[in-house]
Image: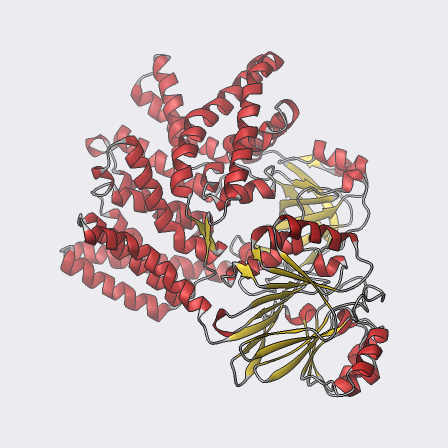
């Protein structure tokens, strides 16, 4: 195709987006694109027709995909014949695995609660790809996101043609039978390989070795993944094009040394690469790398003039991949993999050619990758690393020249010679431990990432246009002051987003859905203040050792911090912790670890919980100001004043009734935040402030029957009541009596367990409520 395939790939992309998104917008863009090709690229009639055909074919293919992307199950089915065809993930007493139902031909996510340590051992030993089990269970719909900018699990599964979560009553492995296929045999080999690593390799080596050899990050701790992601190094933990190239080069070298001809070597590699793809997990980056490598090898073996250009190979890979699976266009791994590859290949004609020195080439390549992926990283993860440019200089050679070959040959030699190889694995273990420690230290450095929040769609378009302009001008070879201004262009785009976010005239109050707990974010107009009232927290129950999860869900890290980052928040001016219960302060450690907290506000009480004591100690270590407040205190920012109404100074009340009670007026609407205040505390508050009233009441203690009494509602006389409670929580919150009281007084009720997050957007004169429907 002589490097023209990229233009057909762009037409196919527009056809897919015209189907999945806004047809008129993308059709207009396609028409403008055609005009560009005719005027600037001098396209002939046959090329124009081909471009139109690519647009139409991929549009129709996407429409077919939409029509077929639906479930045929009703949700009332009880019996299923499950074909397990992948590796399951066991965390504590929970099993999560993907399975294919042979009766309905649908893929299901199976979630099973393991009942004993013995059953866990049986599942770990016997549950593997290629077995079929008949089970009875209940179908549930996957959950959607309940907070703004949060990951939508339901949407993600639907894009992978999965619509149900199955919760079996029992998984009896004795009733299961093997039903192997070529695909499941390969997946079982992969599972056995991972188990082999776990059984015989040093503990610290296993997670990284499993990632490099078998393409699974499941064994890596969330802290390690966060460290690598913060430094822009997470691509090294996935099997990518460079990874495949190194493996192919090693195998090709060995085959040639064995006397096999170059042509036969290419054929053997082409045959074996799909097998390798399955063995390494068949992720989008693996699929892209393997398919592109196969096309390049085919071009060298049978192509005209003995080759297919890399740009045409990636374009053809893109077309084949999306024709088979159009919905892959929404996968972040797919987007990053193809975007970086396209950008680097296009840049190789001009930009990279001018930088032939290895260090200079690596620097420019890293810089291009950082620039091109920044908008995507901001949209999905709300931040990107600014020191990845430097750390990649060290880590890319370390991983691809030392760690990958070391792990690969260490694994192969151990398979062949057994424990005699163990002494050779010790240096590898020490190197990996040292690498992880250095990564952790670097990731803790201030200002190593830029947090700008999720850009709006117009901003995304502006980023894309600005980066395109940046590449065009760089290719033209500007110099002097113009070159300096050119490299300031990406910074200007980031500063523009920061200004839009921080100088908005609108403020907001958001009641986050943190399950059974409280977390309320307040942003004052023009970024004059960012306050967080409580952080939610996971209520933990006593578990046996085999039930413990080392890396489970944590509200602060997995819900509160991502939300704040999505809003571009880097600093919390006041972290107001109303009292020491886990469902109010359990996520505070993650907030303090990930963001800068200027001041922690705690109730002025005699007796504190162990959680509060830990947070005070952590605050002291971070040199964060700690303020103990009681009734009568206040602070003011411009016209916004916040009043502390409770507790009393040096209070001896119980934890709930010693909650910080906060009163303020935002958007000409008065607010009363009550923490977990119960009827005793409400009575004290009414006696102290007999004229107290509020437009919006944050209902105390999640709507417990011990709070929100009739007398309290009569005095406060709220127009709106907001209840923060977990969906189907075991406490029965909010209590029916409380709901009845509120309804009897015709008070509007908003509940996070029903609507998800609740947001009040305001300016100086007024405000509006909105909800995030799950």
Q: Where is residue 698? Give x, y as percent.
A: 70, 75
Can residue 20 be seen?
yes
**176 relative to 732 in the view: left or right:** left
Can residue 555 be seen?
no
Q: Is residue 672 above or below residue 206?
A: below
Q: Looking at this view, is 464 or 638 the one in front?
A: 638
Residue depicted at 57% across the width and 12% down the height: 417
Q: Where is residue 532? Give x, y as percent.
A: 62, 65
Q: What is the quadrant of residue 120 in the picture?
A: top right
Instruction: Look at the image and tell me in which quarter the N terminus lies.
Output: top left
Residue depicted at 81% across the width and 43% down the height: 115
Q: Looking at this view, is 414 or 54 the one in front?
A: 414
Q: Is residue 580 above or below residue 444?
A: below
Residue depicted at 41% across the width and 59% down the height: 62
Q: What is the quadrant of residue 666 in the picture?
A: bottom right
Q: Looking at this view, is 352 or 646 the one in front?
A: 646
Q: Where is residue 757? Give x, y as percent.
A: 62, 69
Q: Looking at this view, is 659 or 135 the one in front?
A: 659
């Amino acid at each position: 195709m002589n490097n023209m395939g990229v233009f057909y790939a762009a037409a196919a992309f527009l056809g897919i987006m015209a189907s999945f998104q806004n047809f008129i917008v993308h059709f207009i863009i396609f028409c403008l694109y055609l005009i560009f090709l005719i005027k600037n690229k001098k396209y002939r009639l046959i090329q124009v027709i081909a471009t139109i055909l690519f647009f139409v074919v991929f549009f129709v293919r996407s429409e077919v995909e939409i029509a077929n992307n639906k479930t045929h199950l009703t949700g009332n089915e009880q019996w299923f014949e499950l074909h397990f065809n992948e590796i399951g993930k066991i965390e504590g007493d929970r099993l999560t695995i993907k399975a294919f139902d042979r009766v309905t031909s649908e893929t299901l996510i199976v979630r099973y609660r393991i009942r004993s340590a013995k059953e866990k051992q049986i599942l770990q030993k016997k549950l593997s790809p290629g077995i079929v089990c008949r089970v009875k269970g209940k179908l549930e719909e996957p959950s959607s996101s309940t907070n703004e900018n949060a990951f939508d699990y339901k949407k993600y599964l639907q894009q992978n043609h999965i619509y149900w979560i199955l919760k079996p009553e029992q998984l009896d492995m004795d009733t299961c039978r093997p039903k192997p296929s070529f695909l499941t045999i390969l997946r079982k080999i992969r599972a056995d390989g991972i188990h082999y690593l776990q059984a015989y390799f040093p503990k610290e080596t296993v997670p990284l070795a499993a990632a490099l050899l078998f393409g699974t990050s499941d064994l890596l701790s969330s802290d390690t993944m966060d460290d690598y992601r913060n430094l822009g190094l997470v691509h090294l933990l996935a099997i990518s094009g460079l990874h495949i190239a190194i493996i192919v080069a090693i195998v090709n070298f060995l085959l040639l040394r064995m006397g096999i001809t170059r042509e036969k070597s290419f054929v053997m590699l082409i045959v074996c690469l799909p097998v390798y793809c399955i063995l390494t997990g068949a992720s989008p980056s693996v699929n892209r790398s393997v398919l592109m490598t196969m096309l390049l090898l085919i071009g060298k073996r049978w192509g005209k003039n003995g080759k297919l250009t890399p740009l045409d190979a990636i374009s053809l890979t893109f077309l084949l991949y999306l024709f088979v699976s159009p919905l892959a266009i929404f996968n972040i791994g797919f987007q990053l993999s193809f975007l970086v590859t396209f950008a680097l290949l296009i840049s190789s004609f001009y930009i990279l050619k001018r930088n032939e020195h290895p260090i200079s080439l690596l620097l420019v390549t890293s810089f291009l990758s950082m620039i091109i992926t920044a908008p995507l990283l901001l949209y999905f993860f709300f931040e990107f690393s600014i020191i990845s440019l430097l750390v990649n200089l060290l880590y890319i050679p370390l991983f691809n020249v030392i760690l990958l070959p070391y792990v690969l040959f260490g694994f192969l030699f151990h398979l062949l010679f057994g424990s005699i190889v163990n002494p050779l694995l010790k240096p590898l273990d020490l190197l990996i431990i040292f690498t992880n420690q250095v990564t952790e230290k670097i990731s803790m450095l201030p200002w190593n990432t830029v947090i700008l929040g999720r850009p709006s769609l117009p901003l995304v378009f502006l980023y894309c246009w600005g980066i395109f302009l940046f590449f065009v001008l760089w290719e033209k070879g500007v110099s002097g002051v113009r070159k300096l201004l050119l490299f300031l262009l990406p910074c200007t785009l980031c500063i523009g987003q920061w200004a839009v976010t921080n100088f908005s005239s609108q403020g907001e109050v958001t009641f986050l859905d943190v399950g059974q707990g409280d977390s309320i974010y307040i942003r004052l107009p023009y970024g004059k203040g960012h306050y967080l009232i409580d952080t939610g927290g996971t209520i933990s129950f006593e578990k046996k050792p085999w039930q413990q999860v080392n890396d489970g869900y944590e509200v602060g890290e997995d819900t509160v911090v991502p939300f704040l980052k999505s809003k571009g928040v880097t600093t919390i001016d006041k972290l107001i912790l109303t009292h020491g219960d886990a469902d109010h302060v359990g996520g505070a450690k993650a907030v303090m670890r990930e963001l800068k907290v200027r001041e922690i506000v705690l109730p002025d009480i005699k007796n504190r919980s162990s959680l509060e004591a830990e947070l005070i100690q952590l605050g002291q270590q971070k040199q964060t100001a700690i303020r103990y407040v009681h009734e009568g205190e206040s602070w003011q920012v411009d016209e916004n004043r916040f009043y502390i109404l409770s507790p009393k100074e040096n209070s001896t009340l119980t934890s709930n009734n010693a909650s910080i009670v906060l009163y303020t007026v935002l958007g000409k609407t008065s607010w009363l935040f009550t923490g977990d205040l119960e009827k005793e505390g409400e009575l004290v508050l009414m006696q102290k402030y007999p004229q107290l009233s509020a437009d919006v009441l944050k209902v105390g203690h999640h709507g417990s029957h011990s709070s929100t009494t009739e007398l309290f509602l009569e005095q406060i006389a709220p127009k709106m009541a907001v209840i923060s409670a977990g969906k189907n929580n075991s406490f029965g919150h909010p209590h029916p009596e409380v709901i009845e009281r509120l309804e009897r007084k015709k008070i509007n009720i908003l509940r996070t367990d029903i609507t998800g997050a609740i947001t009040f957007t305001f300016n100086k004169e007024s405000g509006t409520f909105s909800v995030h429907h799950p």
